Amino acid sequence: MQEEVENKTLTLAITTTKMTGRVLKNAIAKYLAYRKNKSRESPVKPKGKQTVKELVGQNQGVANIEITDSNIRDFDRVARKYGVDYALKKDRSTDPPRYLVFFKARDGDAITAAFKEYSAVTDRRKDRPSVLQKLRHFKELVAAVTPSRERRREHDAR
């Protein structure tokens, strides 16, 4: 890796009658200005979760789906898995608040697959019994099986 960095060179052609420090400085300044303008022309497109403004700014058409579930983090994981560009918008006018998921129109098939997997995950989660309920149940079973300490003390005193 270090050799690649060391081996990279830059060729700068300057037409001048006399090479001075000032001419070299101006040439390098013009090259740096060129590189700066070049980087502005090709901005990096955001991927994954983004704002609605960024999503609409890509000019590829936008569609949306409504979600009423407040657990958006699970959807975020699934959407990243499918490589979907999307934006979340919370609608506070209703109670409970609902969420609108905006996505690119060309990602329609991917977002459909992501929603199927997301709904399957939430259904599995609803079917699972609560860990706290299991713990309470086992506490009751242990309390019923274990004899109380008071009886043991009475046996020891005799």
Image: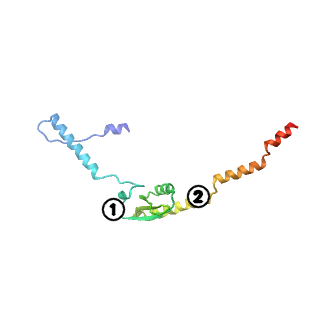
Q: Are marks 1 and 2 in contact (CB under 8 Å)?
A: no
Name the residue nearer the viewer: 154 or 61: 154
Q: Residues within 10 Å of mark 2 (few under 14, many from 20)?
A: few
Q: To which residue does mark 1 refer?
A: 59
Q: Quadrant of residue 148?
A: top right
Q: Position of residue 86 (x, y in %)?
A: 42, 58
3D distance between C-alphas at marks 1 and 2: 37 Å
| Amino acid bearing label 2 | Arg
The residue tagged 2 is: 125
In front of the other: 4 or 49: 49
Image height check: is 6 above or below 143?
above
Q: Nearer the viewer, residue 106 or 5?
A: 106
Q: Earlier in the sequence, mark 1 or mark 2?
A: 1
Looking at the rendered structure, the secondary structure element under dot 1 is loop
- The image shows residue 34 at horizontal and vertical percentages of 23, 46
Q: Quadrant of the image for the C terminus?
A: top right
To which quarter of the image does residue 59 belong? bottom left
- Choose mark 1 or mark 2, whichever is in front: 2
